[in-house]
């Protein structure tokens, strides 16, 4: 298959629309004439929530907070071949992206509004679908903006356009932490801690329907996908590894050759169950029991399956169900399922998972053997069996 053409870099004309360091905010764009789908992609990259964490972020990964030195073109990050015709703008400037310093900030809202205006101005008003896609923490901003896009399209007379969302690994859970931390480092701060600390800084306008579910002190929970989902009217497809490597990393759990504490072990055992419970009410989901982070950006995303169904097939079934929602007969979920969650209890019980790579030893490891060695009781027994040096 022919590789997609590089996206071209464009800058916003308003000089007030800037990145965190004051450089011009922009976006990458690739057009397809005659497209029936307009695709707006939100990239990932976690967040920062204070001057200290943002300074550290800029020092370590400045490309997420500045457009200086940005390439004039790039290959699109989203590789969903089931939607090959969509015009796809991708933010090039971090402050306009949901996962950066202002997680769902005013700058992001400006860029999303521009994307809608651009679509209509360039003749995309005949597009049948406006698909918002996101990876990792970008999913938070996408979900927060989904209904606003619907309202904006209605105001512009394009209410016939169907707005949908596709979330890849933006389903962070606020489980009890297996370790205590002062969260001084944004890259290692748990989702709930980062949101609580950044709420005032981001000044994000939350969905009123979601806010009404919580006390004012708990409104931060509207940043969590599984808390926000029931407040959305537009259809959303959730792609999520049952064992998200980033969620585990934020909780200081690194699966490989190291042993786990009792608390970490129990957290790992509970994670799959908690994730499944959080997605019971989600109408469309694809969740393999693998240990990884992000799925649709992988070149081999078509290889993963849940209960014998690939993501491409699940997306097609979801699409058919939406197209037939107002028609009869309705698509039968048994013959064309799109609610797929692995129910096996451990990572890599799904045979389509990629091999586990232990960066500590530099090569692939057998996960079943590694899992056995990581068990706290095995570690304690091994320690007892060590010969006495005396």
Image (tube, rainbow, N blue to C red):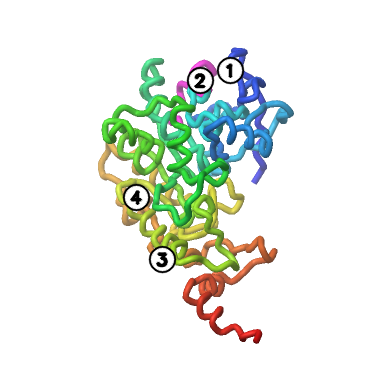
Chain-order first, disc 3 or disc 4: 4
Residue placed under numbered mark 4 in the picture: 278
Which quadrant would the C terminus be assigned to in this image?
A: bottom right
Residue 251 percent location from the top left of the image: 49, 53
Q: On residue 110, which mark appears?
A: 2
- Marks 1 and 2, Cα distance to the nearest angstrom? 8 Å
Label 1 or label 4, whichever comes before in sequence order:
1
Cα–Cα gap, marks 2 and 4: 31 Å
x and y percent of residue 134 in the render? 50, 38
The residue identified by callout 1 is 17
Badge 3 density bin: few <14, some 14–19, many ≥20, Cα 10 Å: some
> On screen, 46 above or below 239?
above
Note whether residue 302 is visible.
Answer: no
Nearer-N-terminus badge (2/4): 2
Q: Decide: marks 1, 2 in contact (CB < 8 A)? A: yes
Q: Tag 1, which secondary structure?
A: loop
Give the residue furthest to the right.
Answer: 69
C-alpha distance separating marks 3 and 4: 16 Å
Residue 265 versus residue 293: which sits nearer the camera? Answer: 265
Residue furthest out toward the front: 390
Number of marks in the rendered image: 4
Measure the C-alpha gap from mark 1 to mark 4: 37 Å
Does residue 103 appear left or right of residue 386 in this picture?
left
In magenta, the rendered stretch is 111-130
- Does the CB distance between marks 1 and 4 fall below 8 Å? no
Q: Is the Cβ of the residue at disc 1 closer than 8 Å to that at disc 3?
A: no
The answer to which image quadrant residue 195 occupies is top left
Q: Which residue is mark 3?
A: 345
Q: Residue at x 45, y 40 (%)?
A: 166
């Amino acid at each position: 298959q022919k590789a997609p053409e590089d996206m071209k870099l464009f800058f916003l004309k308003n000089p007030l629309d800037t990145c965190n360091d004051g450089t011009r905010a922009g976006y990458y764009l690739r057009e397809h004439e005659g497209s029936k789908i307009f695709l707006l992609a939100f990239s990932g990259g976690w967040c920062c929530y204070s001057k200290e964490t943002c300074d550290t972020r800029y020092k370590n990964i400045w490309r997420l907070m500045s457009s200086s030195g940005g390439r004039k073109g790039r290959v699109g990050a989203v590789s969903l071949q089931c939607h090959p015709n969509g015009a796809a703008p991708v933010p090039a400037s971090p402050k306009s992206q949901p996962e950066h310093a202002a997680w769902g900030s005013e700058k992001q809202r400006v860029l999303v509004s521009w994307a809608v205006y651009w679509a209509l101005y360039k003749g995309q008003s005949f597009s049948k679908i406006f698909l918002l896609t996101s990876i990792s923490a970008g999913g938070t901003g996408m979900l927060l903006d989904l209904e606003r896009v619907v309202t904006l399209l209605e105001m512009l007379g394009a209410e016939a356009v169907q707005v949908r969302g596709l979330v890849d690994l933006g389903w962070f859970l606020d489980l009890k932490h297996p370790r205590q931390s002062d969260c001084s480092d944004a890259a290692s701060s748990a989702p709930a801690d980062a949101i609580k600390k950044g709420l005032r800084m981001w000044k994000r306008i939350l969905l009123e329907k979601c806010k009404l579910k919580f006390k004012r002190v708990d409104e931060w929970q509207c940043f969590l996908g599984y808390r926000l989902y029931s407040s959305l009217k537009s259809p959303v497809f959730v792609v999520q590894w049952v064992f998200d490597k980033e969620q585990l990393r934020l909780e200081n759990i690194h699966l490989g050759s190291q042993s786990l504490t009792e608390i970490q072990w129990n957290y790992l055992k509970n994670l799959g169950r908690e994730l499944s419970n959080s997605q019971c009410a989600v109408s469309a989901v694809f969740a393999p029991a693998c240990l990884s982070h992000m799925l649709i950006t992988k070149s081999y995303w078509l290889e993963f399956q849940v209960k014998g169904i690939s993501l491409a097939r699940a997306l097609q079934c979801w699409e058919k169900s939406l197209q037939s929602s107002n028609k009869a007969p309705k698509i039968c979920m048994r013959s064309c399922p799109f609610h797929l969650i692995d129910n096996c209890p451990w990572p890599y019980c799904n045979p389509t998972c990629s091999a586990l790579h232990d960066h500590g030893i530099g090569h692939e490891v057998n996960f079943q053997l590694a899992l056995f060695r990581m068990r706290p009781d095995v570690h304690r027994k091994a320690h007892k069996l060590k010969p006495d040096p005396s």
